[in-house]
Amino acid sequence: MENSNAQKIIKALQAEVISNGIVAKTIVPELKKLREFALLEEKPVLVKALRLAYEHIDQNEDFLVNIPSDEPIEDNVEISTDSSTSESFTYFMSLMLDLDNKHNVADLKEYNQQFQQF
């Protein structure tokens, strides 16, 4: 995201989660604010990712999706990673800082798929 206020929110959320873990009542309102910035910047993948993320956290009181794998995903193969929910959330947020990177956008799309399959 290019907006400096959005970047501040992203960095504050990362610090919050590292310090206190996933606290839905703190994180969800901030993700909703970020979604408004994404709408203004016309980033549809990010808009969707943020909506799915805050709905997921609101419903589960945690961030239960894994960091996307660098390996190509094969059908019917269960992929498990040992990343903590805080690590996955922090990585998810870091993707938003550079949306010009095609790998970041691809990982956001992977997060979107995981949210929808959850």
Image (cartoon, helix red, strand yellow):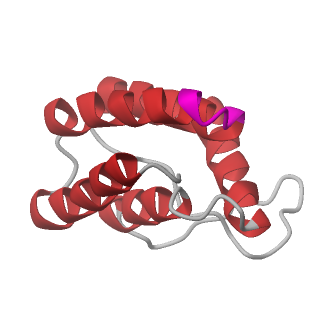
Specify whether residue 118 is in view: no
Residue 47 appears at what percent x and percent y? 58, 32
Q: Is residue 85 above or below residue 81?
A: above
Question: Would residue 49 be visible to someone looking at this image?
Answer: yes
The quadrant holding residue 75 is bottom right
- Find residue 49 and report its image quarter: top right
- Residue beneath the point at 20% across and 64% down: 15
Residue 91's place in the image compared with 56, above or below, is: below
Residue 36 in the image, given as x and y percentages of width and height: 45, 26
Residue 100 lies in quadrant:
bottom right
Q: Residue sitting at 55 percent across and 62 percent down? A: 95
> In front here: 61 or 49?
49
| Residue 118 or residue 39, whichever sits in front | 39
Is 41 magenta? The answer is yes
Image x and y of residue 39, in percent: 57, 27
Q: In the image, which residues are magenta?
A: 39-44
Is residue 118 left or right of 42 when viewed as pictured?
Answer: left
